[in-house]
Image (tube, rainbow, N blue to C red):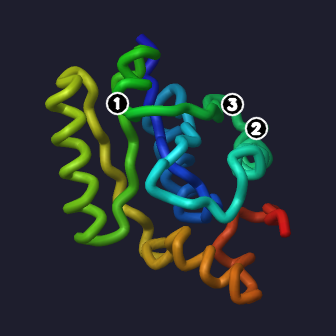
Amino acid sequence: MTRIAFFPGSFDPITQGHVDIILRGKDLFDKVVVGLGRNTNKNGLYTMDQRLDLLRATFGHIDGIEVITYDGLTVNYCKDHNIPYILRGLRNSSDLDYERAIAESNRSIHPEIETIFLVSRPEYAHIQSTIVRELIKNNSSVSQFLPYGVQLPL
């Protein structure tokens, strides 16, 4: 049986923290599907196509990692595509409270889908896409927060 996990996000932009969780998840699962979701509550700094290009540049060469886009609820995508695990990263206790509420809601919709949490490594725990976007908007360098070699669109 192939163990597949789904790592959803808006990745606006993708950060070293995301990459760390995805690569660590790849060590635990046979395959990690990185799902670029449309979040109707967020106005993106980058277009979906730009974010998809960044994800593909970061993971396109790694066996066992697939990058896709999707609409709707993550748990429904997982159900429709027979993906039994949702992989999430936790930076702090606020993330835990938020992610736990989502995991419990997902479990009430599709109890067969399990959410797996990985705690961020300390060196990545402070990185948030929201902060990175604010730095970008104010013309500050963000290369230390991004995957190695990733160049953001201007």
- Whole-angstrom CA distance, mark 3 to mark 2, is 8 Å
Q: Is residue 70 above or below residue 11?
A: above
Quarter holding the N terminus is: top left
Of pointers 2 and 1, the one earlier in the residue sequence: 2
Determine whether the residue tagged by mark 2 lies in a helix, strand or loop: loop
Please indicate whether residue 66 sits to the left or right of residue 113 in the image.
right
Circle 1: residue type: Val
Query: Disc 2 or disc 1, which is closer to the eye?
Result: 1
The foreground one among 2 and 146 is 146
Determine whether the residue tagged by mark 1 lies in a helix, strand or loop: helix
Dots 3 and 2: beta carbons under 8 Å?
A: no
Provide residue 34's location: percent of width, then percent of height: 56, 38
Taking the spot 22% from the left edge, 23% from the top edge, the residue there is 110
Provide residue 58's location: percent of width, then percent of height: 73, 49
Quarter holding the C terminus is: bottom right
The foreground one among 9 and 137 is 137
Provide residue 129's location: percent of width, then percent of height: 55, 68
- Whole-angstrom CA distance, mark 1 to mark 3, is 24 Å
Q: Quadrant of residue 135?
A: bottom right
Q: Which residue is mark 2?
A: 60
Determine whether the residue tagged by mark 3 lies in a helix, strand or loop: loop
Q: Residues within 10 Å of mark 1 (few under 14, many from 20)?
A: many
Taking the spot 62% from the left edge, 29% from the top edge, the residue there is 64
Q: Which residue is mark 3?
A: 63
Circle 2: residue type: Gly
Q: Quadrant of residue 74?
A: top left
Taking the spot 43% from the left edge, 37% from the top edge, the residue there is 28
Dots 2 and 1: beta carbons under 8 Å?
A: no
Of pointers 1 and 3, the one earlier in the residue sequence: 3
Taking the spot 24% from the left edge, 35% from the top edge, the residue there is 106
Please indicate whether residue 112 sits to the left or right of residue 85 in the image.
left
Kindly identify which numbered label has been placed on residue 75: 1
